[in-house]
Image: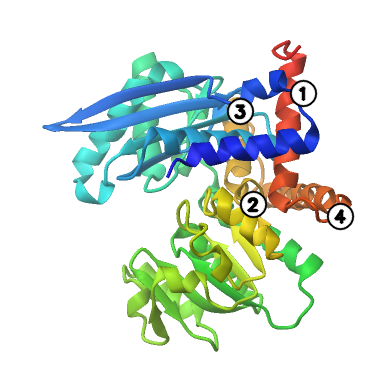
Amino acid sequence: MNIFNDNLERLKEIQTLENIDDNAMQVLLEPIKTSYAELTVGDNKYPAWRIIYNNALGPGKGGIRFHPDVSEDEVKSLAFWMALKNSLADIPYGGAKGGVKFNPKDVSQAELEQISRQYAQAFAEHLGQDKDIPAPDVYTNGQIMSWILDEFEKKFGHHEPGMITGKPLELGGITMRGDATAQGGYIVAKELTAKLIHQKEISVVIQGFGNAGLFMAQKLFQDGYKIIAVSDSQGGIYNEAGLDIRQLADWKNKGNSVIDFETGKKINNADLLELKTDILVLAALENQITANNANNIQANYIIELANGPIDLAADKILFQNKKIVVPDILANSGGVIVSYFEWAQNRTGQILDDDYLRQLLEKKMKYNWQKVYDLYDNRGGVISLRQAAYIIAIKRILAAEKWRGHIK
């Protein structure tokens, strides 16, 4: 499945809705820079990419993922989403993304370090606090960011902590980065509930029980939401009466899969998506809801904590079925907003109070939710929340491109 073709079709929808001319849209049809390298460790070669999609609003910004399914099409699509996400969030970044095609679970820690350092060497000329700023993504973390930072600084002979975010505190990281994506999604979920779901008990299904999904489950559980099912890469666990997320989180944090949890019924990921529930949180990978299962989705509200979990064909079906989808570029933007806080602190040397930054994240997430919802509502529901978010994001990028003289 070509994910990027879906993105081009989404752009065409926005072009038609907003009557944007072809000349203006040209700046969004392809990335401005695609860099490729093969990283060599022993006898193994690993394809690697760094793509900047657009930088009209600022330097490239986006994570690096290590995954066996990484491809240029995927990285390009993720960079496109980052451009829109950063624009919608109203932060001074363009969109970028990186990836290495391999399974990090199959290599030693020493090999993982070699791959990370080779990534920094391969793309060092393209990276920098004013050029392109990576961050963690799927199967990457603060340790990997640290190796990349160290290799980059060795090459150029000076400290530049702002060239990468998601770092440990000791290297200029920020306390709240670890749970920022889920915290932002949680804030949006609460706003959605307050605006649209007027009932005492609210049921939730969460696909993906890694960092973001687990945090989201814990926060909603604390607030009295009934989490009836969760899943990880091995499968899911379902309990119509509600799962005890405190116990399940302890179980998961000990290295176990949720499918082996002592209470509840085992369920596969496909069936989990189709459970009857109020809210479905998608916190796994791309293309989880497609034309094949979209008509079977019973949740009335869907929150995309992962990037691109619903393809274009499914999006149309869900909209026709009056399902409300909070799009990824809004729902999971907490991570990049907090990355911006980290980058700004690294640039200025001014360390801001955590409580202040948490309040600022909440303020920005609520404001961004409101502007997307208001546009959706003002159009009388004839566009989706995703289309509303895309309209806002794309118009801001095009305005910047016009000011720069790239659009006549």
Q: Which residue is mark 4?
A: 380
Q: Secondary structure at mark 2?
A: loop
Residue at image coords 70%, 22%: 22
Q: CA distance from mark 4 to mark 2?
A: 18 Å
Residue 188 in picture, x, y percent from top left: 69, 58
Mark toward the start of the polypeptide (3 vs 2):
3
Identify which amino acid the numbered label 4 is placed on. Gly
Q: Which residue is mark 1?
A: 399
Q: CA distance from mark 1 to mark 4?
A: 25 Å
Tell me whether the residue at label 4 lies in contact with that at label 2, contact meaning CB atoms closer than 8 angstroms: no
Residue 291 in picture, x, y percent from top left: 52, 58
Q: Secondary structure at mark 4?
A: loop
Residue 16 in picture, x, y percent from top left: 74, 35
Quadrant location, the C terminus: top right
Tell me whether the residue at label 4 lies in contact with that at label 3, contact meaning CB atoms closer than 8 angstroms: no
Mark toward the start of the polypeptide (3 vs 1):
3
Q: Which residue is mark 2?
A: 327
Residue 337 in picture, x, y percent from top left: 63, 42
Residue at image coords 34%, 17%: 155
* Marking on residue 94: 3
Identify which amino acid the numbered label 3 is placed on. Gly
Report the front residue among 337 and 196. Answer: 196
Q: CA distance from mark 3 to mark 1?
A: 13 Å
Identify which amino acid the numbered label 2 is placed on. Pro
Left or right, residue 152 beside residue 303: left
Mark toward the start of the polypeptide (2 vs 1):
2
